[in-house]
Structure formats: structure tokens, C-alpha cells
Amino acid sequence: MLLLFIGYLVLGAFAGVLAGLFGVGGGLVIVPVLVVTFQFQGMVPEVLTHVAVATSLATIVITSISSISAHHKRGAVRWRLFRFIGLGVAFGSALGVVTAIELEGKVIQLAIGVFALYVAVMMGLDVVPKGGGKPSRPGLVVSGGFIGWVSAIFGIGGGTLTVPYLNWKQVSMQEAVATSAACGFPIAVAGAVTNALMGQGNSNLDEWSLGYIYLPALLGISLTSYGFAKFGAKLAHSMSPTMLRRAFSVFLLLVAGKFILSNI
């Protein structure tokens, strides 16, 4: 158990850097690592992926606070945009949890891989449509709802959708990353609370669980992710937009490869 907890600490540090750097919340790293870890622990396959997703969302609550603080100090968060997209992501996240519980774990894992691959190609080749126009309030709410729904299913902070969407809507890469980090908070809170409630009474869950949230992993990851998210945010503002976009796409390609190859 001690070695597993140390592993959670290392995972939290890595996820924290990614959260600050890319505005993704770290879920695209946390979920696959937790899936492998829970398999090693002998967790029941029927709930394993759902626990990984739920725990990831819970850790993003902590990570996003640190990332938001660091980006806000640099004046990069577009709070006017966040007010409307945040409303949508919170509602969509709760709905996404309900959807995810009805899906098989392998289906969720394969879907994450395909989705990550698509976004990686779009951003890596810079084929995101140009001239998307400035975002409207209704558009932000509706788009936020979709982002929150997908993010809760995959256990991510929404950055893989929010960053390209805002970038398309003529928001600079650094501001898109910063605003995405802010959007990760309502996604994570709504998703974590819904997972905690809907997992009550499930006999397949470990005794150290709060609903679908596995508490030892939540504690270990949260202890290190908070501080390292600040470092990631600082790093993001020292990189050029082009370099940041390419690094983001490489990161997504690695995640996509892992999920697709292990589930086909």
C-alpha cells in the first residue's frame, strides 16, 4: 500500500504540471494510470474504469484551484467568458456522470483514445477552423454543456475541448489555456459530487471509497498536484503559442495510443 501511495504522489506531481501547462486538469494522465493501478490492485472490472474517472474528477477540484490562481495572477483568465461557459459545463458534467455509469469501462477507454487522437491531429497540424468569430453568450453556454458532458464521461477537466474551442473563437493560446483551467473547476465539482452520490450502496466498491471516488488515490494525487500546477502555469506563459500547441498535441497522441492499443 505504501508503494501505491508513493505512486499516487508522483502521479499527482505529473498531473499538476500538465494542468497548469495545458489547462487540461491532468485527467488524461490520471485516468489511464489509475486504470492500470486499479487492475494491479485487483479492483472489480465492472467498476474499475468508473472509479478511475470519478477519482480523476475529484483530484481536478484541487488541481484546478492552484492552476486558476497562477493564471489569474498573470491576468490571463477571461472571466467574462467563464461566467457563461462555466454555467454550461457544470450542468453538462452532472449529465455526463449519469451517462458514463451506463457505459462499459472498455467503451469509455476506447472513446477517450479516439477523442484524444482527433484533437491531437487537429491542433498538431493547425487545422482548427479559422475565423470562428467572437463567442456569443448562448453559444458559450451550449458549448460548455457539451464540453462538461464529454469531460465527465472521460474524467478530464475539459481542456482538450475548451482550449481548441476558445482558440477557434479568437482567444489567444495562453488565455485559452488559462480560461480552460477555470472551466475545469465546475466540471470537476459537479462530476465528483454526482459520482459520490450515485456510487452509494454499490457492493463492488472498495471500503475506502466515497461513492465511486477512491479516497487513497484522491489524497495522494492532491497532495502534490496543487503545488506542481503552479509550476506548469508558469511554464505555459514562458512558451510560444506554437510550441504550446505542438506540445499539447504530442501529449494527446501519447494518451490516444495507450487507450486505443489496449482496447482493440
Image (cartoon, grey):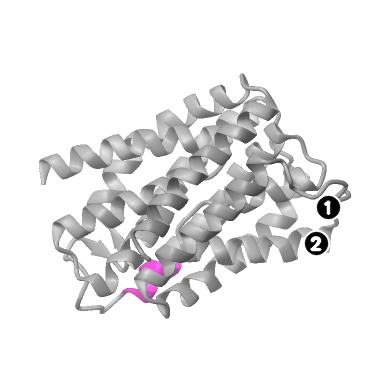
The amino acid type, in three-letter code, at marker 1 is Pro
Element assignment for label 1: loop
**Residue 148 position by quadrant:** bottom right
Question: For this view, does 183 lie left or right of residue 135?
Answer: left
Callouts 2 and 1 close, C-beta under 8 Å: yes
Percent position (x, y) of residue 55?
35, 56
Question: For this view, does 258 lie left or right of residue 118?
Answer: left
**Residue 50 position by quadrant:** bottom left
Percent position (x, y) of residue 213?
32, 61
Tell me which secondary structure the magenta stretch mostly adopts: helix
Please tell me whether residue 189 belongs to the stretch shown in magenta: no
- For the point 72% across and 51% down, which residue is it? 165
- For the point 36% across and 33% down, which residue is it? 13
Question: Disc 2 versus disc 1: distance between alpha carbons?
Answer: 6 Å
Please tell me whether residue 195 belongs to the stretch shown in magenta: yes
Percent position (x, y) of residue 140?
76, 58
Element assignment for label 2: helix
Question: For this view, does 176 lie left or right of residue 67?
Answer: right
Percent position (x, y) of residue 185?
54, 50
- For the point 45% across and 58% down, which residue is it? 155
Q: Nearer the viewer, residue 171 or 61?
A: 171
First to last magenta residue range: 194-199
Q: As drawn, which residue projects farthest toward the left?
A: 1
Query: Residue 165, can we see it?
Result: yes
Packing grade of label 2 (10 A; few <14, some 14-19, many >=20) is some
Check residue 135 in the rendering and tell me which mark sits there, or answer none.
Answer: 1
Query: Residue 25, can we see it?
Result: no
- For the point 63% across and 45% down, which residue is it? 180
Q: Looking at the image, is 124 positioned above or below residue 207?
A: above
Q: Give the residue pinned by disc 2.
A: 139
The amino acid type, in three-letter code, at marker 2 is Gly
